[in-house]
């Protein structure tokens, strides 16, 4: 069985990502920020802070 949990962090996702990466001795293999969203015309209207916020990230833990 393969488990894929999903957690939301309301503005603190990058801090949480780094914490879990360290705890699970993992690697980030996918990281997507609001400012990198392809095809979204609204992304150009975001301020610098919001462009850098994470939309989605994935960590693979080492076993």
Image: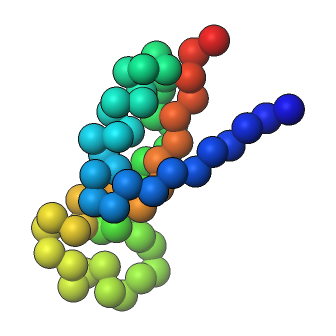
Residue visible at 33% across and 61% down? Answer: 10
Relative height, residue 46 to residue 41 (above, below):
above
The number of numbered badges drawn on the structure is 0
> Is residue 57 something one can see in this rendering?
yes
Residue visible at 51% across and 51% down? Answer: 7
Residue 8's spot in the image, x, y percent?
45, 56
Residue visible at 63% across and 12% down? Answer: 63
Report which quarter residue 53 is drawn in.
Answer: bottom left
Residue 25's spot in the image, x, y percent?
46, 16
Relative height, residue 44 to residue 25 (above, below):
below
Which of these two is toward me, 4 or 32? 4
Residue visible at 32% across and 86% down? Answer: 42
Report which quarter residue 36 is drawn in.
Answer: bottom left
Name the quadrant of the N terminus: top right
- Drawn side of residue 44 relative to residue 33, left or right: left
> Is residue 33 something one can see in this rendering?
no
Q: Which residue lies furthest to the left in this view?
A: 48
Which of these two is toward me, 41 or 20? 20
Residue 45's spot in the image, x, y percent?
21, 85
Relative height, residue 19 to residue 55 (above, below):
above
């Amino acid at each position: 069985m393969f488990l894929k949990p999903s957690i939301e962090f309301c503005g603190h996702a990058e801090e949480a990502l780094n914490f879990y990466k360290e705890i699970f001795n993992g690697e980030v293999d996918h990281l997507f920020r609001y400012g990198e969203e392809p095809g979204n015309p609204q992304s150009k209207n975001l301020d610098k802070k919001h462009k850098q916020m994470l939309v989605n990230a994935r960590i693979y833990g080492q076993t």
